[in-house]
Image (tube, rainbow, N blue to C red):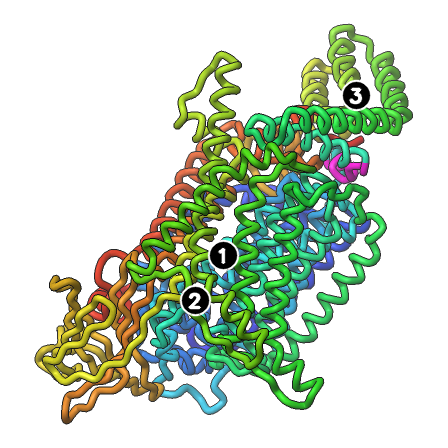
Amino acid sequence: MGASLPSFGTSIVFSILVLAAYTFSVSVVAGRSRPHLLASARLGAYATSAVICCGVLLLSYGFFTHDFRIRYISQHSDRGMSPWYLLAALWGGQDGSLLWWTFLLGGYTAGCVAWMRGKYRALQPYVIATLMVVIAFFAILMMFAANPFEQNLAGSPGEGTQMNPLLQNYWMMIHPPMLYMGFVGCSVPFAFAVAALITGRLGNEWIVAVRKWMLLAFLFLSIGNVLGMIWAYEELGWGGFWAWDPVENAACLPWFTAAAYVHSTIIQERRNMFRVWNVVLICITFLLTIFGTFLTRSGLIASVHSFAKSDIGPFFSWFLVMAAVIAISLIVWRLPELRGKAQIESVASREGMFVINNWALLGGMLFILGSTTSPLITKALMDQEVTVGPPFYNKWMAPIGLLIFTLMGLAPLFGWRKTSGSSLKGAFAFPVGALLITTLLHALLGPKWGYPPVVSTTAIEAGTGARIYASIASFFPGITVSLAAFNITVVIQEFVRGTKARMSSTKKKGDPEGPLLALSRLVQKSRRRYGGYVVHLGIVGMYLGFVGTAWQVEDEVNLFPGQKATVADYELTYQGPRMCPGNPACSPEEQAAKGKRMLFADVVVKQKGRTLTTLHPAKFIHQNPPQTTTEVGLLRGLRDDLYLVLAVADPKTKKATFTVHVNPFVGWIWIGLLVLMLGCGVSLWPEVTTKRATAWTYVRAGVAATAGVLITFTLAASLAQPFAGSFSVSGRSHLHQHLSEGAKP
Amino acid sequence: MSEEESTMMVSWPPLIALSIVVGASIAGVVGGAPLVFIFLSASALTLTIALLWSSLGRMGQGARLNFEDALELAAPTATEEQKLAVLRALKDLEYELSVGKISKEDFDAASADYRAQARRLIAAQDESMKEQLEAAEALVSQHLSDSDPEPQRTKAKKVKSSGGKSRSKKAKSSASTRDEGDSTSDEETDAVENDTAEASDSEPSSEPKKTKEAPENNTSNAPKAGDDSDESPSSEKSESAPL
């Protein structure tokens, strides 16, 4: 095995294509004329997933045995890397990440095929066939452009090159898999849409089938994007979490359309409307995932993610064009059957609000898409590249975001078809009351606490229009906080009204329920609706985190050892620099660090005379590859984060320059994600069905429950971990050292 | 590998998974992470070969579609879809009245409108299925007159009276018919065999397990508000199977 691993791995990659092609053929035949072949197609799909799994495990084996004959392994790992980072190196580079992507797609395919057992007989062959086409594309890509098992032409080097130090971060271990899970997850709804269009079964059948898959993809996209924010916040050291980098933008594009679909599918189910729209949204979402990958890999647009740059862009562009042409052709072919007769009767209705919400989400997506690709567009049209920066995005995305935020609160207050004025008055009374009270309190107390509702902004362009807009934009922080209160009240009101209605209904039936029982049964009976409301609460948390940037405090201080500086209400005392390993003050873990020199600058943090912690912002000088990284000193809190960056430290004078950021409410973004995950979990929770239990049923249930609890705990604990206390470099060192100093997985 | 062997192998995924986990654990204790990966990789490859073998084996069998699967292949009609959407809208309307999102006047007006639509769609559906129902009734009558026993006729009439609305009832009925020694059609026999297969909790070989999976089949054919059971029309469960 050892002697032939690269060639054996390559043959496995070839096998993926062969098996995918076989399964595709059998599926198409099963769909066209021989339905009894479906069982063969299903087994073929499982076999394809299993062979992909074999490939990933082989590559992992190569990493763990340091088989540097394989080029990818020698370029992304060395013998000193910890097992966790060896595992993360699987997706840390181009070729491996494509195999990892295929692996996740194989997992989704196997899961989807297992889930379809005994259901969707007519759609199954084409769902499987579509998924096989996507798998085959990735197999072709690996075979001809990015083979992760390709051998080093110059022979095996004695030592490999470490993965990019920026990627050796705890969050980077889970951010890409989560984002890929979201991206890849969009393939399943697309496969169902294609199957529905081919078979002409365009009713609600496939919509019902798809909704949970899309919600799952939406959940993973949310997690992936937020984890990316956390990584950028901790690792890049510029004080923010979202820089509107093209690759970040590409990752969030499908999120917008997935969110739009999750809402518009309800209209099709309830009112039998928007069939064309829903198909289009699903296709766009899938195409955006491919486009995002194309943007990341092609290197067409400059990005901080340049480590992913390669020459596989043309493959993606061709696949993108092919998928778009097929999707558009199928939609045009089925257009007469897709068109519904029902129409929106009034804008003052739930469906009316959903439509506006859809347009707002789509508008946001189009704006980001247009701005991200502006260098390409302007180059093609005007022969000069025009790139827009974060101020441009912030300027225009703020009103779009606020529109979406407003609609999120408004939609639940409306009924289907049309809502009378008297009903609206009742529905709006409490939320509007909460909005007004919050606005008043914010105006009175905000300035005193350092969070004024009006924050003056400067126009980024010249002209009267820009100045007027800037003065309007200065009210955005206050508006966001008021809308947050509005949204929270709407959700609470929905829960209260639903519970009351249920209590009243059960009382009439002679089986009265208490408030808690009624609430729990209400959620149990309408998980999607109430899970959705919980997701809204999560989004509110995130908006609070975003608006906190308006009150961010940033300062640069130069200190000699023993000197103090005050930023916001934090008092910082610089103790001095130390270089590790070598300095006696370094901890044993710091002394044992290999392959890098670490320059720490210790700072004691006090607030109102009370010592909070000692932060250790640092510069790490890596040897292989030679690279310097900035390690942030972070003190997290629910009110704000103290974010300390060591800019320069003079070894002779020991003078250090720090950039200090006080970031209000950033933690609420991560809390919002946890709430969003909870809401999605409620919506996705499977329906309990009565079924005869066998011994294996219990074993499966036990294993599934244990796995579910473990995964949830791991994710929740990892996200909540920053709040466990001080999260300075020393606070993080426990985790970091655990990861980097050879802890076994 | 014989057919039974291949069926057995793919029918017991939990046992296979358990064996792999145990094997990987032993490999981990003996040789650490690399041995775990190589063991898992070998297992995945073995599984691939077995699954492919099984897939190829099934291609040549030329098995016939059973009754339930054939029914499943029929698409719900546009009328059926519209009817379900209207019934669901009615249910939503009731919920919205109960939580005060719409006034009683709006509820009465909208409810009357939806009910009229539902009546029209149900009538249209009955009309479109009239010929098939009559043909089915004639076939059942002929079948019953060929096989005489009185108790079975009673049961079969029950099936007939349901107008083909519930597949599970039909399958159960055919099962009881066979138990009583009557001759059954191939399709009915298949359904009964699949019922038996379901008990063994097998996977690919027992895809058509309609009787027990009736609620799921309803979901597949009719857009029931799956997880929003409060919001689903009560009539969906009995009206989902298209004929």
Identify the mark nearer the N-term, 1 or 2.
1
Q: Are marks 1 and 3 on the same chain?
A: no
Horizontal arrangement in the rendering, residue A441 relative to residue A559 (left or right)? right
Residue B177, x across and y down, in percent: 72, 16
A528 above or below A236? above
Which image quadrant is residue B50 in?
bottom right
Segment colored magenta: B69-78
A482 vs A652, left or right, is right
Spatial distance from mark 1 to mark 3, Cα to Cα?
45 Å
Label 2 is found on which chain of the structure?
Answer: A
Q: Residues within 10 Å of mark 3 (few under 14, many from 20)?
A: some
Of the residues shown, which amino acid type is indicated by label 3?
Gly
User: Are the residues under marks 1 and 2 on the same chain?
Assistant: yes
Q: Position of residue A607 (x, y in %)?
A: 17, 64
Which label sits in the foreground, 1 or 2? 2
Seen at 13% across and 81% down, the residue is A576
Residue A220 is tagged as: 1
Residue A42, position as x, y percentages in the image: 64, 50
Q: Main secondary structure of the magenta part?
A: helix
Q: Which amino acid does label 2 sit on?
A: Gly
Crowding at label 2, few (<14), some or many (≥20) Cα neighbours within 10 Å?
many
Q: Name the residue under label 3.
A: B163
Amino acid type, callout 1: Phe
Q: In this view, does A195 lie to the left or right of B211?
A: right
**Where, by quadrant of the figure, is residue B98 drawn?**
top right
Label 1 crowd (10 A; few <14 / some 14-19 / many >=20): many
SS at mark 3 in the image: loop
Name the mark on residue A228: 2
1 vs 3, front mark: 1
